[in-house]
Image: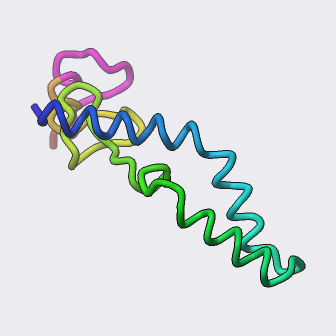
Amino acid sequence: MAKKSAIDKNKKRAALVAKSATKRAELKAQANDKNASPEDRFNASLKLAKMPRDSSKVRVRLRCELSGRPRGNYRKFKLSRIALRELGSAGQIPGLVKSSW
């Protein structure tokens, strides 16, 4: 099980990303607009830089929903490899069959 503080910090980041997604997208569009004046583009990039770093989407870490494990996760199931194997062996995940050869 991962540290509770790390899991909570990641949840706060995800909430901040959701809250500031539209403003961030607008500022990025202004900063990348080739038809805008250089001053407007520069001001947009300054405003974007002043926003909290944790409001960026890349700062959110994919963690296992059950254990909070940060590595070895499957995006489709939102589970770590260990939790996926345990639930798959128990028959809790429909359509998942453990292979053997």
Q: Residue 53 in the image: state x and y as whole percent.
A: 43, 57
Q: Place residue 98 in its image quadrant.
A: top left
Residue extent of the magenta highlight = 87-98
Q: Residue 10 in the image: state x and y as whole percent.
A: 32, 40
- 23 sits left or right of 33 in the view: left
Q: Residue 37 in the image: state x and y as whole percent.
A: 86, 81
In this orientation, which residue lies closer to the viewer: 75 or 43? 43
Q: Residue 31 in the image: state x and y as whole percent.
A: 72, 72
How did the renderer colour the structure? rainbow
In this orientation, which residue lies closer to the viewer: 84 or 50? 50
Q: Place residue 33 in its image quadrant.
A: bottom right
Q: Answer above or below: position of 36 versus 62.
A: below
Residue drawn at x 12%, y 35% as measured from the top left: 3
Q: How many marks?
A: 0
Residue drawn at x 10%, y 31% as measured from the top left: 1
In this orientation, which residue lies closer to the viewer: 61 or 27? 27
Residue drawn at x 26%, y 34% as measured from the top left: 64
* Residue 93: in magenta span: yes
- 1 sits left or right of 59 in the view: left
- 25 sits left or right of 18 in the view: right
